[in-house]
Image (cartoon, coloured by chain):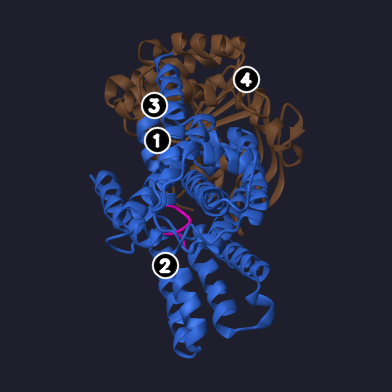
Amino acid sequence: MIHFKQAEIGYKNPLLKVTDLSLEAGKVYALVGRNGSGKSTFLRSITGQTPLLAGEITINSVSIKNANAIEKSKTIAFVESKFDGIAFLSVANYLALGRAPYTNALGRLSQADWDFVNQVANEIGIETFLQKETLSLSDGERQLCAIARAIVQETPVLLFDEPSAFLDYANKQILVDKLLQIAQEKQKCIVFSTHDLDLCIENKIEFLALKNKSLQKASGLSKLELISLLETKS
Amino acid sequence: MIQTQRINWFLVVSLLIFPLIAYFHLTVGQQEISLTDFKNAIFAYDSTNTAQLLAREFRFPRLIMACVAGAGLSLAGMLMQTLFNNPLAGPYVLGINSGASLMVAISLLTGIQFFGTNLGLISSALIGAFAAGMLMMSVVGFLKSQVSLLLVGLMFGSFTSAIVSFLEISSKAEQLKSFTLWSMGSLQNVLLEQIPLILLFFVIGIIISALIVKPLNLLVLGENAASLLGIKIQQTRIIILIITALFTGLITAFCGPIAFVGLAVPNITRILLKTQNHFYLIAGNLLIGSAFLVLCDILIQVLESEIQLPINVLTSLIGAPFVIFVLIRKMK
């Protein structure tokens, strides 16, 4: 689904080189690496927010560079860091904003759009607080809302920057369960950055490990092996 | 949906109350004018009738100007607050007024012939507003916190007022007087013949605002998230800059700088309507903004026999404490 070919990622100087990498539909990938290793930049390069210095990233054989804003918004959904909630914005209306790529110039949702919003809310398990204000929710509830908002966007690729950072243990497990379930049921390609190594190992999530300006896939490693992999100095 | 019901009720009720406020504003002046005189002043105008003349040449223009200024500044403030994702933004605090004022000061105080005319005044205010708006837009990218944008706006205001003070010292008494009068702000400076042009710009601005409701609604999520949802950020920014500068420049040229309306009213509207749907927010800001300034002007006219209260002084007296209230609410 997502292919990296000789991609050089970074600002001015390459922070990361990804020579050949394929990410598949129906799978969840955990992006891990030390602070400053380029996790966020990697995610932003997929969305095109950080243009590549060299090489190419394609999604379903279409180069990101050539996609316009609307095409991109129908291909990639990205939730950046923590969602803090917004005053006077209800959960229902927050989710509805995810339909923006499909609505007309005035942004009105059709009945089908609203049905889809409600369906996603049910799947994620947030249907009981659709009418609540986003500001009044707990961190865990808000994070689920952010994920639901991304799913409402109905894109084949979903990217999350540290979605588990502010969650308690139970909520982290719920989050991972939902991500795995969505990837399988809807055949989406999900990448999320995280520092919760245990959580990903327990749930058998494939790792994308960043170190020494390169990225490698890793799975079936123990925590110790993984940490030593991330720690290796060049 | 409970939310939409609440908003609809609010809009219906304020649409009913608004004509009453407007009528009260028309009748509040020193000379009494009957309802039939008001009617005749529109439909069967007789210029020899003093009451009708007063109504047509003074009362109506003043009411319309109060509505346009209140609504326009509030709408401009709402656009800036949404664009910068900052409840403290507004045409006055961000120095858009200051830019207009500076250019007006240059044109009034230096006494250059072209700028002395009415058209010259308007165009210099517009140029100043655009320049200040562009400056703010280019600075905002470097600022991390919401308060620092406010500080930059304040510094810009101090900087321009320093230049204005310098110009005041070096100008002639007559020019100084006309500038001082302008800077206090007045809703009575507009002439009947100028009203159609003002209304034309005003309506165009509102229509364009209504057309960017979708980008505005998405900007609430922040610029990055909005652009990932397919919004052309650069284009939206430019449209907002144009409307804001147009409204602020036009209103400042005719009424002088009016402080805080553009900051306070959008906040009040959001709190009252409890929505982030900009379709309703635009309607709410237009209604509350014009009602607010009409009420202020009623107060000014009621007190007129006792004290002379310029509009800018009154809105500052109400607005400055309100900014502190918003700040405290935000910082908690």
Apparent side of residue B97 relative to residue A100 in the rendered image (left or right): left
Residue B202 vs residue A16, the one in the foreground: B202
Q: Nearer the viewer, mark 2 or mark 1?
A: 2
How far apart are labels 1 and 3 at the CA level? 25 Å
Q: CA distance from mark 2 to mark 3?
A: 50 Å
- The chain coloured brown is A
| Secondary structure state at the residue bearing disc 1 | helix
Q: Nearer the viewer, mark 1 or mark 4?
A: 1
Q: Amino acid at mark 1?
A: Arg
Q: Depth-wise, is mark 4 or mark 3 nearer the camera?
A: 3
Circle 4 chain: A
Q: Amino acid at mark 2?
A: Met
Q: Does mark 3 fall on the same chain as mark 2?
A: no
Q: Which residue is mark 2?
A: B184
Q: Chain of mark 1?
A: B
Residue A185 seen anywhere in this rendered image of the structure = yes
Q: Are marks 4 and 3 in contact (CB under 8 Å)?
A: no
Q: Is residue B6 above or below residue B27?
A: above
Identify the magenta region: B88-95
| Above-or-below relation of B3 to A116 | below
The residue shown at (26%, 44%) is B329
Which amino acid type is marked by label 4? Ala
Query: Can residue A220 be seen?
Result: no
Chain of the residue where label 2 is placed in the rendered structure? B
Q: Which residue in the protein does label 1 denote?
A: B270
Secondary element under disc 2, as helix, strand or loop, is helix
